[in-house]
Image: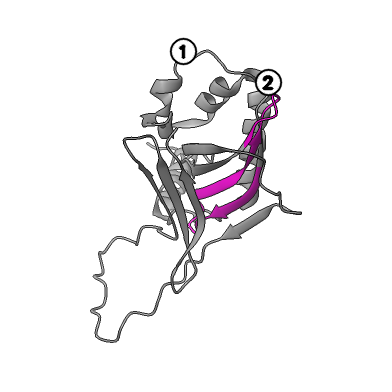
Amino acid sequence: MIGRPALLAAAALALIAARPPVRVQPNPSAVIAAEIALNRAVQDEGEWTALRAAAAKDAVMFVPQQVLAQAWLKGRADSSRGTVRSPHRVYAACGGRLAASSGNWTRSDGSAGYFTTIWRRDDKGRWQWIMDHGGALASARAAPEFLIGKVATCKRAVPPASAPPPAKDAPPPVDESLTWTAQAAPDGSRHVIVRMWTGDAYETVIDDRVAAP
């Protein structure tokens, strides 16, 4: 005989299973917090150790050719801890699981540059980076007075009247409100673009071009 507590537990599990998955709310502030934590780890533990700890398994970086980050960073001796990352702006997908951050980096030797990082929220709620790249500049870019956080819209363009209705068992559309591409050339140059959906069209919000070394 199954006791009352067991029946209640089974009923609760069935109720939870029947509920639709909770929609993740986009939160640029959480990505800024992840950037701040990464910067702190760089100072405390070293750049490569910090990047390795925050990277997803499929993360990529450029050295200058594209490589899998975890494989390239594994066992690599840390560079100077004098690199400081300062995020300026964050763009988040409306689905709440993808975001792009961009800002300046500076080093204790006086060199400066910029970075762009793509972040992904995993099933445990952790933000991990999946693409990181940057370039050197003669001087750091001007920082905005306030950190900028923007969220793409989930609004879709109205389909034409002649378009057939979606099938009842059709899967929900993939969140493509924030897209990114990273194209690397054999000479080591690369082009990184991040676009955000406005409801009517894609707006290019990040357009980084790095020359061959």
The C terminus, quarter of image: top left
Does residue 31 lie above or below 42 as drawn? below
- Report the amino acid beneath label 1: Gly
| Residues packed near mark 2 inside 10 Å, few (<14), some (14 to 19) or many (20 plus) | few
Judging by the rendered image, the residue that carries numbered circle 1 is 75
**x and y, in percent, of residue 118 in the image:** 49, 44
Q: Which dot marks residue 44?
A: 2
How would you classify the magenta stretch by its main secondary structure? Answer: strand
Q: Position of residue 46 (x, y in %)?
A: 61, 19
Q: Are marks 2 and 1 in contact (CB under 8 Å)?
A: no
Range drawn in magenta: 87-112
Q: Earlier in the sequence, mark 2 or mark 1?
A: 2
State the image coordinates of residue 51 (x, y, percent, origin top left): 54, 27
Question: What's the amino acid at mark 2?
Answer: Asp
Residue at figure coordinates x 54%, y 54% from the top left: 92
Can you say whether 171 is above or below 136 in the image?
below
Residue 110 belongs to the span the image colors magenta: yes
Which residue shows up at 41% across the image and 34% down it?
60
Q: Is residue 4 inside the magenta stretch?
A: no
User: Total of numbered circles in the picture?
Assistant: 2
The answer to whether residue 97 is visible is: no
**Circle 1 SS class:** loop
C-alpha separation, residue under disc 2 versus residue under disc 1? 17 Å
- The dot on residue 204 is none
| 136, 162: nearer the viewer | 136
- Image quarter of the N terminus: top left
Q: Position of residue 44 (x, y in %)?
A: 68, 20
For label 2, the SS is: helix
Would residue 168 be visible to someone looking at this image? yes
Left or right position of 85 against 76: right
Which image quadrant is residue 47 in? top right
